[in-house]
Image (cartoon, rainbow, N blue to C red):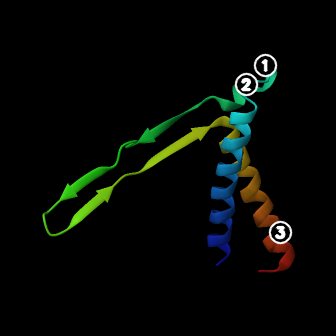
Amino acid sequence: MRKFLIIVAAILGMIVGIAVGESLKGVSFLSFLAIGGSFGFPNPITIDLSFMQFTIGIWCKVSICGVLCMVIFALLAKQILSWLKI
C-alpha cells in the first residue's frame, strides 16, 4: 500500500510538473524547465478483427520540471506516510 501511494504521488508530480513547466515556458530565465521530449505512439493503433476491435496507444511527455516535481512529490509522500505511520 505504501509503495502504491508513493507511485501515485510521483505520477501526480509528473502531471503537475509538466503543467508548471509549460506555464513557465514564456519566462526567459525559467524556460529551461520546459525542455523535454515525448515518446510512444501519438496516434493509436487500431486492430480490427471484424468481430472485435482493439485500440492500442501509449504516449508519454517528459520535461525537466516534470522530473523534478515527480521526485519532490515522491519524497514528500514518503515523509508524510512515515509521519502518519502508514
Residue name at image x 65 percent, y 50 percent: 15
Looking at the rendered structure, the secondary structure element under dot 3 is helix
Q: Does 60 sit left or right of 18 as displayed?
A: left
Place of residue 76 in the rendered image (x, y in percent of width and height, measured from the top left): 80, 60
Q: Are marks 1 and 2 in contact (CB under 8 Å)?
A: yes
- Quadrant in the rendering for residue 32: top right
Place of residue 8 in the rendered image (x, y in percent of width and height, measured from the top left): 64, 65
- Quadrant in the rendering for residue 75: bottom right
Residue name at image x 69 percent, y 43 percent: 19
Q: Earlier in the sequence, mark 3 or mark 1?
A: 1
Looking at the rendered structure, the secondary structure element under dot 2 is helix
Q: In whole angstroms, how far apart are the C-alphas of marks 2 and 3?
A: 31 Å
**Three-letter code for the amino acid on which mark 2 is drawn:** Ser
Residue name at image x 67 percent, y 31 percent: 34
**Three-letter code for the amino acid on which mark 1 is drawn:** Ser
- Quadrant in the rendering for residue 73: bottom right
Residue bearing mark 1:
28
Q: Are marks 3 and 1 in contact (CB under 8 Å)?
A: no
Q: 1 above or below 36?
A: below
Q: Which one is in front in this view, the residue at disc 3 or the one at disc 1?
A: 1
Q: In whole angstroms, how far apart are the C-alphas of marks 3 and 1?
A: 34 Å
Q: 79 above or below 41?
A: below
Q: 38 above or below 2?
A: above
If the image is split into quadrants, where does the C terminus sit?
bottom right
Residue name at image x 71 percent, y 49 percent: 16
Place of residue 22 in the rendered image (x, y in percent of width and height, measured from the top left): 68, 35
Residue bearing mark 3:
80
